Image (tube, coloured by chain):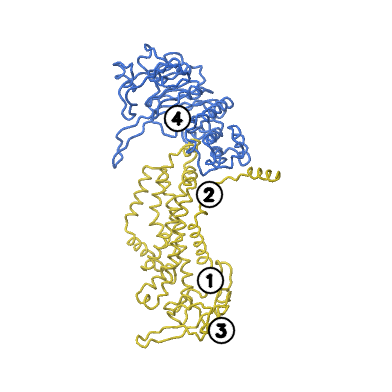
Amino acid sequence: MAQATTKGASETKKQVSQSYWSLVWWKFKKNKTAVVGGIILIVFYLCFVGLAEFLAPYSLERRSNYTEAPPQIIRFIDAQGKFHLRPFVYGLEKHIDQETRKRTFKEDPSRVYPIYFFVRREPYKLFGLFPTDIHLFGVDESDPAASIFIMGTDSNGRDYFSRILYGGRLSLMIGLLGQFLTLLLGCVLGVISGYYGGATDMFVQRTTEFLNAFPDIPLFMALAAAIPKHWSPVTVYFMLTIILAFVRWGGLARQVRGLILSLREREYVLAARSAGASDARLMFRHLLPGTMSHVIVIATLSIPGMILSETALSWLGLGLRPPLTSWGVLLQEAGTVYAIRYAPWLLWTIPFLLITILAYNMLGDGLRDAMDPYGGR
Amino acid sequence: MVAEPSPQDNILLDVRGLKKYFPIQRGLLRRTVGYVKAVDDVTFFVREGETLGLVGESGCGKTTAGRTIIRLYEPTAGSALFKTRLLSPDGSPQMVDLLKADKQQLKLLRQEIAMIFQDPINSLNPRMSVSDIIAEPLVIHGRGKGPEVEEIIVNLLERVGLRPEHMRRYPHEFSGGQRQRIGIARALALNPRLVICDEPVSALDVSIQAQTLNLLQDLQADFNLSYIFVAHDLSVVQHVSDRVAVMYVGKIVEMADAEELYINPLHPYTEALMSAVPKPDPLYKSERIVMQGDVADPSNPPPGCYFHPRCRYAVDICSKQTPEFRELRPDHFVACHRAEELQLRGV
């Protein structure tokens, strides 16, 4: 009994102070939807950006003889109704349509290819650092006809699942990178505009208005056309990121400026100023952190827009071009009536895109609520 | 026009003809169509170790005056001579005009002048811990490092009645009175000589007000501080001030020793204010002077004495000529044409 009271006393003494960010985290955790969104995004970024080579059974450009093959379904129960512990796929069999003379593939239940895990196939570098050749799954390739296309193949016979994995890398990264650049431009220019006011403010604000008033698609076209054709795909990729950020920073700068205008007159800013703080210290230590909660929410909620812009541009043929593969490039290949009629599995990109965007929105909504831990309940 | 302080006075701050006009801008081209004369020709001085109370109703410019002296606002005109030892190489005292100091001088001078703010919620950055808040002036001026700073913070916290373990906490974990103590600790971090207290207790409840005022007085004695104490609560001002200046629409109308001013006001506006002070005497029959009309508009003040439309003693000259701010009795300054002849009631 006595022990219990002393223990209680020592526990009350060890009071932990909650910083702003720990309060945010505490409130964020209570929002299940947002946590799910966050987890989905972590898993997606891990799978697509970090582990694409490991998860993909084939490399991006590996062609096979099976063009526009339908997905091979992963099965546990064979045609005889017998259960197998090791999953397997059926082999593909060529058919010629007698009317259209079109080559199609069908699953052939007589050929069974068991799926093996952690198989050694094409070598790659994990995270771009560690050379290895282990892939998560594959079939025994001693039979040259063996294949595993769980999401079918495209018109060149390339495994669509592998392509979605590699394409996701570019699409997801362009969202993050582009948003990062937007943040940098928007925050710095917004703070400067709001803090100094006057002519500086006028100039920044008119520039953002000019950019906002410009129709997006022609601007993209003009900027994309300005990218020389002989540039390497990687340079083109970074150029596109910069273009996306350049077009989008205005809105953020304007919001940051508005917040700065209201924070500028807060007494804690005056207190720092009266103590002799420099302009830079006031801007980046007192004013900008006060806008961060808002900015992070805006940024999270506009990453999907970034990803979709890339997709739209690539779909229009203005963005990334093969051999660079993003979800936009994949959708461009799938964007014909022919593809939808004869190879609907090429639309597999869309669910991935949808889930990413939904997850970002869920996360952003949760962050918005969590970022104001003093308000509400 | 200028009230000359007597030469034997130990003047720390001597403000003369201070003006702060805020432009009113209209239209697309932001043309200036007029000015809000927030502080209009204010003259006063502060002696070393004393408290000057600055009273007046809302919007009379007392906060603006305080902020203009410390250059949070750029002054329109005037001078504010401050006695400093930091600018001369041998540390001898020197009067420097705060309003004309350049950037480097100002940064040095700001070590000697601190400010305490009204709103204990808004005046502490919610993203910074208490130790960061109090250490900020030290960091800005490059005073001390690591453990040294920590020691200073612990001392300051104890001095203002908080516990050292509070330094790891964040402002939202404190009550209003405690937050104001943090603000006071921050103001004292650099060992200032003049502290401008901008309504430091008006956002606190009465019991906490008394504690905070007593703390401020103790600190004044310990560190030989001078205060400019901006407030609208006359009883608070009477409690803390050695001398009091009364402001009306951007001008100081009367300045005197606190006791003298409360007992023997010379300006009709002061008299009206005094009649509004509640007395803790149930038998006392209030003879409150209720002023007519509204406070003058500082962007369009009336001619002559700004107070004349509401003054019950006003005569012709009051609406025509601006009264001079003069020393009518020793150390008792007033700006009223009829100050000599009027017999006004004090508290």
Instruction: Name the residue that disc number 3 marks.
Output: A142
Callout 2 and callout 3 share a chain: yes
Query: Which mark lies nearer to you, 1 or 2?
Result: 2
In three-dimensional space, the C-alpha distance between marks 2 and 3, rounded to whole angstroms, equals 55 Å
Label 2: which secondary element? helix
Q: Is residue B199 above or below residue B124?
A: above
Q: Nearer the viewer, mark 3 or mark 4?
A: 3
Instruction: Tell me the quarter of the image containing the C terminus of chain B.
Output: top left
Which residue position is annotated with label 1? A55
Tags 1 and 2 on a common chain: yes
Residue A352, horizontal then vertical, whole percent: 45, 67
Is residue A337 toward the left or the right of residue B88 in the image? left
Q: Residue at x 48, y 57 (%)?
A: A34
Mark 2: amino acid: Trp
What numbered label is drawn on residue B149? none
Sort mark 3 into few (<14), some (14-19) or many (20+) by Cα contacts within 10 Å: few
| CA–CA distance in space, label 1 to label 2 | 35 Å
Protein chain holding label 2? A
**Which residue, as the protein is rendered here, is positioned at the far right?**
A2
Q: Position of residue A12 (x, y in %)?
A: 63, 43
For residue A120, what is the image quadrant?
bottom right
Q: Earlier in the sequence, mark 1 or mark 3?
A: 1
